[in-house]
Amino acid sequence: MRLAGKTALISGGARGMGAVEARLFVQEGARVVIGDVLESEGRQVEAEIRATGGEAVFVLLDVTSEAAWQRAVATAVSRFGRLDILVNNAGVGGAGRLEDTTAEEWDRVMDINAKGVFLGTKAAIPAMRQAGGGSIINISSQLGLVGMGESSPQYQASKGAVRLLTKLTALQYARERIRANSVHPGPILTPMTERRRADPAVYERMVSRIPLGRYGEPDEVAYGVLYLASDESSFVTGSELVIDGGWTAQ
Ligand code: NAD
């Protein structure tokens, strides 16, 4: 078991890649705290994991709230005794031209995708220090590495921010054995991409940009996150794991 004895907190764990990561982590021996704004979906993932004999707890977590993050970390410590792994996975998408983007929409996406990662990291570090170290995995995007005109200013800026916040975290906490790495998925088959995939023209355009010729499956990202969460990656910090079907190789 690759995560035996470890406790993980996964934001946005109620569906999509976060839920797949929660199930995979439990299979590998971890106890998991699932944090999300989607309560019924989150409780369902919790129930499914428990039905298989795994240990999981759902907490209502809005990643833009510092107090909610503190409650989520406190739950990990009180229920499972420690916090070893944080996956800052919660995020929202967006498309739109810069001139048509409102300041409110910019703030909303930046708050969830960028400030949420900062607040989660800030809340987790004292508990990881207490545990003698830890691993923080921040889910950016291939669009945190390269531009795409069809994206939105707030999505691109937020995912770029996650990439460099990860490196700062890695540098400031390396001596405390707290590692931080970013993951950069390309287009993945999750609810986030569902609406745009339903438009055949958009779908074809996206697939034509992916050298492997298809969208990725959520578990193809989750296995990368698992590696970074486990002690197999004990000498890896401040790095970028690109899982994008070749998108950024071009
Ligand atoms: P998804 O929409 O299926 O899941 C995202 C989860 O985050 C949902 O459960 C949602 O409720 C939760 N969330 C949203 N706002 C929140 C908030 N304020 N507080 C707590 N939880 C909140 O999306 P996904 O595709 O699984 O995306 C997971 C991560 O991967 C996101 O950060 C996304 O930007 C990133 N990503 C996705 C793709 C893709 O193609 N799907 C590609 C690159 C990066």
Image (cartoon, rainbow, N blue to C red):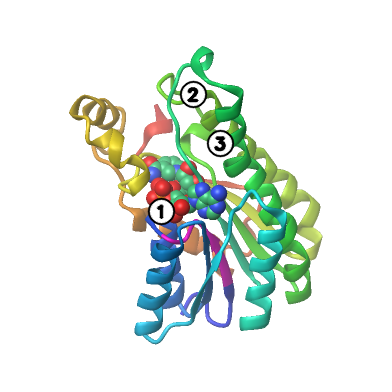
On residue 147, the disc is 2
Task: Classify 10 Å Cα crowding around label 2: few (below 14), some (14-19), many (20 and above).
Answer: some
The answer to whether residue 217 is above or below residue 101 is below
- For the residues labelled 2 and 1, the Cα–Cα distance comes to 21 Å
Kind of element beneath mark 2: loop
Q: Residue 106's x, y, as percent?
A: 58, 28
- For the residues labelled 3 and 1, the Cα–Cα distance comes to 22 Å
* Residue at the (52%, 32%) spot, across then down: 155
* Residue at the (55%, 29%) spot, across then down: 105
Q: Residue 112's x, y, as percent?
A: 58, 43
Is residue 172 found left or right of 44 in the rendered image?
right
Task: Classify 10 Å Cα crowding around label 3: few (below 14), some (14-19), many (20 and above).
Answer: many
Quadrant of the drawing holding the C terminus: top left
Most foreground residue, 84 or 73: 73
User: Dividing the picture into quarters, in which one does residue 224 lie?
Assistant: bottom left
The answer to whether residue 122 is above or below residue 97 is below
Amino acid carrying mark 1 in the image: Val
12 in the magenta segment: yes
Name the residue that disc number 1 marks: 221
- Asked if disc 3 and disc 1 are in contact, CB closer than 8 Å, the reply is no
- Asked if disc 2 and disc 1 are in contact, CB closer than 8 Å, the reply is no
The answer to whether residue 76 is above or below residue 146 is below
- Residue stretch in magenta: 8-14
Name the residue that disc number 3 marks: 109
Amino acid carrying mark 3 in the image: Val
Q: Residue 100's x, y, as percent?
A: 49, 15
- The answer as to whether callout 1 falls within 8 Å of ligand 1 is yes
- Asked if disc 2 and disc 3 are in contact, CB closer than 8 Å, the reply is no
